[in-house]
């Protein structure tokens, strides 16, 4: 009896061994490069493994394997399922997942899940700024990132805004650290073409900034520029923006009649004789805000060419921006031309060489005292009386005919006389 039982057990064990199956394989990406660390799990079970540095895996003793399915998952790639069937060797190609990549944020030399650092890191993608009229990259952060204050300190064309991450952190310098494609930059981002930006990350807390040391005490702004893609055809992209700039709202001031009436009241209260006998005859007078403000044109052009082969990628772009000022546009302007090149070539399995070149030429002129509380054009426009005419007649020397001299307003804020 015992011999029969042992015989049956041996038969059952042999059948189970015969029905069990081993599966091995390799997991690669779309460029046929091995993916280490990919999780491989038998669906519906706890049996699984991960791929090694060469992207290879092995699963032994899978019972009833022909009816089982393997699930492959990896951060940044689409989850994939493959029925085992009668296969003993598999070749799995995983596709990148844009949705999953958006959930990962680059921090220094590593990555973290965005859900874990939402309050410490803010991200702005190229899609977020594509339809915005930007003359500088700094402007892309305005109203787009929490905890980041972007304030325009001057109205001059092309002027740099003041950026503060979670407030003022030092009595000396509170400017953040700028890192472009892993390279620490001295100064701001005025040389970059906004159309060349792939993404911007703002690191705000000590943990995420620690990798950059004491320089990151005011926060870090990481900028990633656009690059070509492997095995991609040539893409040509042209972006053009044309527009006009105007003053949104002007300060409501007294006109000439109202000014004269108020002046008469003030001298009467002082016991003097009114200076204006008929204030209504003065009419509206001069509105100096209308005289200094004008419609300023704006234009921006950008063209880029990108693509790649199985080993090389390239991205070349050129941009031009011409912005006039709404105050004296003929002498207040900012022009900028930029040219950039970003390419890489894969020499071997572990060696890739590349370069990033950027050239920017900028010409800017204000001709005005833009930030003075006294004597600037805006201050003068609010304080000059509406009784003074814009143009007055003046005789300049005995040998000169009569000229129309641009009036007090222009001479006060530009410190020069313009004759027509």
Image (cartoon, helix red, strand yellow):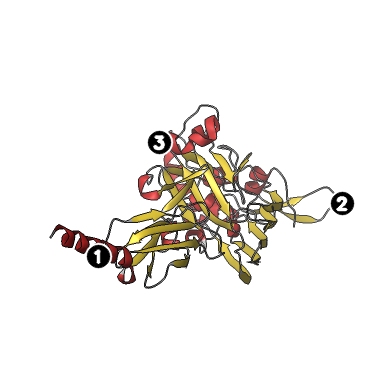
Single out the mark in the foreground, 1 or 3: 1
Q: Quadrant of residue 79?
A: bottom left
Q: N-terminal of the two: label 3 or label 2?
A: 3
Q: Residues within 10 Å of mark 2 (few under 14, many from 20)?
A: few
Query: x, y percentage for residue 34?
Result: 53, 58
**In the image, residue 209 above or below residue 320:** above
Give x and y (percent) for residue 305.
66, 67
From the top left corner, tell me how far across and down residue 5 is, in percent: 16, 60
Q: Earlier in the sequence, mark 1 or mark 2?
A: 1
Q: Residue at x 48, y 61 (%)?
A: 27
Residue designated by label 2: 399
Left or right: 33, with 119 as reference point: right
Quarter holding the C terminus is bottom right
Q: Report if the CB atoms under discs 1 and 2 are less than 8 Å apart.
A: no
- Residue position marked by numbered label 3 in the rendering: 269
Q: Residue at x 29, y 55 (%)?
A: 46
Secondary structure under tag 1 reads: helix
| Residue toward you, 87 or 347 | 87
| Residue situated in front as seen by the camera: 290 or 181 | 181
Mark 3 or 2, closer to the camera: 2
For marks 1 and 3 on the same chain, the one whose residue lies earlier in the sequence: 1
On residue 11, the disc is: 1
């Amino acid at each position: 009896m015992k011999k029969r039982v042992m015989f049956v057990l041996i038969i059952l064990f042999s059948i189970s061994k015969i029905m069990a199956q081993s599966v091995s394989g390799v997991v690669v990406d779309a460029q046929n490069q091995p993916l280490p660390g990919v999780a491989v799990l038998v669906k519906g079970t706890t049996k699984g493994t991960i791929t090694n540095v060469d992207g290879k895996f092995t699963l032994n003793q899978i019972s009833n394997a022909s009816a089982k399915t393997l699930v492959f998952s990896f951060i940044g790639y689409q989850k994939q399922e493959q029925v085992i069937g009668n296969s003993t060797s598999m070749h799995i190609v995983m596709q990148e997942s844009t949705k999953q990549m958006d959930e990962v944020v680059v921090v220094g030399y590593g990555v973290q899940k965005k859900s874990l650092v939402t309050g410490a890191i803010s991200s702005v993608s190229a899609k977020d700024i594509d339809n915005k009229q930007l003359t500088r990259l700094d402007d892309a952060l305005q109203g787009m990132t929490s905890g980041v204050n972007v304030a325009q300190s001057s109205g001059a064309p092309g002027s740099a805004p003041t950026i503060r991450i979670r407030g003022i952190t030092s009595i000396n310098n509170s400017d953040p650290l700028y890192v472009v494609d892993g390279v620490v930059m001295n100064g701001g981002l005025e040389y970059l073409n906004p159309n060349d930006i792939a993404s911007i990350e703002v690191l705000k807390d000590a943990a995420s900034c620690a990798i950059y040391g004491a320089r990151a005490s005011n926060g870090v702004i990481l900028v990633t520029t656009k690059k070509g893609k492997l095995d991609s055809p040539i893409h040509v992209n042209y972006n053009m923006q044309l527009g006009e700039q105007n003053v949104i709202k002007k300060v409501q001031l007294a006109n000439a009649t109202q000014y004269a009436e108020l002046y008469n009241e003030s001298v009467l209260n002082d016991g003097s004789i009114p200076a204006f006998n008929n204030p209504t005859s003065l009419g509206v007078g001069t509105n100096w805000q209308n005289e200094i403000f004008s419609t300023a044109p704006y234009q921006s052009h950008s063209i880029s060419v990108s693509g790649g082969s199985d080993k090389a990628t390239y991205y070349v772009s050129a941009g031009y921006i011409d912005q006039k000022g709404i105050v004296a546009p003929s002498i207040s302007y900012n022009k900028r031309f930029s040219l950039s090149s970003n390419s890489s070539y894969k020499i071997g399995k572990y060696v890739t060489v590349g370069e990033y070149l950027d050239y920017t030429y900028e010409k800017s002129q204000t001709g005005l005292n833009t930030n003075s509380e006294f004597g600037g054009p805006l201050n003068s426009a609010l304080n000059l009386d509406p009784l003074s005419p814009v143009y007055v007649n003046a005789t300049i020397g005995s040998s000169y005919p009569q000229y129309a001299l641009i009036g007090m307003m222009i001479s006060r804020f530009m410190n020069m006389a313009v004759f027509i």
